[in-house]
Amino acid sequence: MLTGSIQITGEALSGAEIKDICDSLKESSVRLLSVRGCQLSDRDFGRVCRGVAESHSLAQLNLNLGVVSTIGRTKQLAEALKANRSLQTLFLHGSPLLDAGLVTLNGALSTHPSLVSLDLGDCMLGDEAVRLICGLFPPDGAKSGLKELTLSANPAVSTQGWARLAIAVAHSSQLRVLNLDYNPLGDHIAGMLAVSVASSRTLEVLDLEGTGLTNQSAQVFLDMVENYPTSLRVLVLAENDISPELQQQISDLLSEGEEEEDKDGEARGSSVTPREKPAWVPHSSKG
């Protein structure tokens, strides 16, 4: 297995650095490329995209924090994803994609044969984007689909949009991790998500940190984990108006369920844990 990685953060990339990156991609000698928060010209971004298109080894691509800054770059990335066959994880956190960007990317995302993890947190998305994202959750095992999705800090999504997502999650045959932290969901949407969790046979991690929930939501989740079998292992409820006691009760019950599963020898081969929170400032809170 190739283990090469290129990780650069917050730098202005020179032409020579771009050439080295592109050469490594075309030689298929790198599995992880991260240029989060880096500055590069449109021409050089296009060169990197062509390298991504030609790579047979690239498994993880991190373009977080504004690297994909225009619709032109979004189109170049979409073309690269259409040609690439190896990518498994794509990070676009903090990119001003808007719904138009998702429309541009959707064809490539929905047909990619290997993509299983997608981070679209703080991408200024709305209901149209969520509608397209729901199409990345196949309701059966007939084709591959997302196993991990991050939609943190996209406050323009409406109640209708989140409800559509909840329905798609309930019917997804593969989704294991869903991060919705720092969206203004409230108790109503949380109730819908509880039904999704109860219906899903695969969802193991749900992050609802800072989503405007109260004890009402927590009680619904508590009733669910007490009375119904679920795949859920981790429920993040920090930074909400929920009592520590309720949070602890839910955590304890989920832990008990995981221990019982391990004892029975039915635990999955790979463990799923909440991601490390990225250091970012949502667009919505920028001055």
Image (spheres, rainbow, N blue to C red):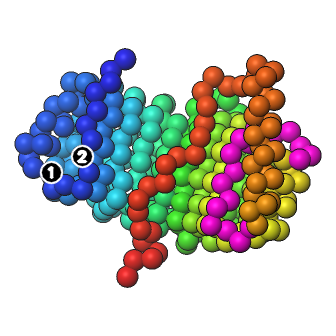
Q: Does the image show residue 38? A: yes
Q: Are marks 1 and 2 in contact (CB under 8 Å)?
A: yes
Q: Nearer the viewer, residue 206 or 22?
A: 206
Quadrant of the image containing the C terminus: bottom left
- SS for callout 2: loop
Q: Nearer the viewer, residue 138 or 202?
A: 202
Spot occupied by residue 188 in the image (x, y as percentages of width and height): 78, 69
Residue 157 is left or right of residue 223, and the answer is: left
Q: Main secondary structure of the magenta part?
A: loop
Q: Nearer the viewer, residue 30 or 227?
A: 227
Spot occupied by residue 240 in the image (x, y as percentages of width and height): 67, 68
Spot occupied by residue 247 in the image (x, y as percentages of width and height): 75, 57
Segment colored magenta: 226-242
Residue 179 is left or right of residue 13, and the answer is: right
Q: Residues within 10 Å of mark 1 (few under 14, many from 20)?
A: some
Check disc 1 and give the amino acid type: Leu
Check disc 2 and give the amino acid type: Ile
Residue 65 is left or right of residue 89, and the answer is: left
The structure residue drawn at horizontal position 86% and vertical position 50%, both measured from the top left corner, is 224
Residue holding disc 1: 13
Spot occupied by residue 90 in the image (x, y as percentages of width and height): 42, 43
The structure residue drawn at horizontal position 66% and vertical position 29%, both measured from the top left corner, is 142
Residue 185 bears which disc, if any?
A: none
Q: Earlier in the sequence, mark 1 or mark 2?
A: 2
Task: Judge whether residue 238 is colored magenta.
Answer: yes
The quarter holding residue 254 reads: top right
- SS for callout 1: loop
The structure residue drawn at horizontal position 77% and vertical position 31%, both measured from the top left corner, is 259
Residue 133 is left or right of residue 185, and the answer is: left
Residue 8 bears which disc, if any?
A: 2
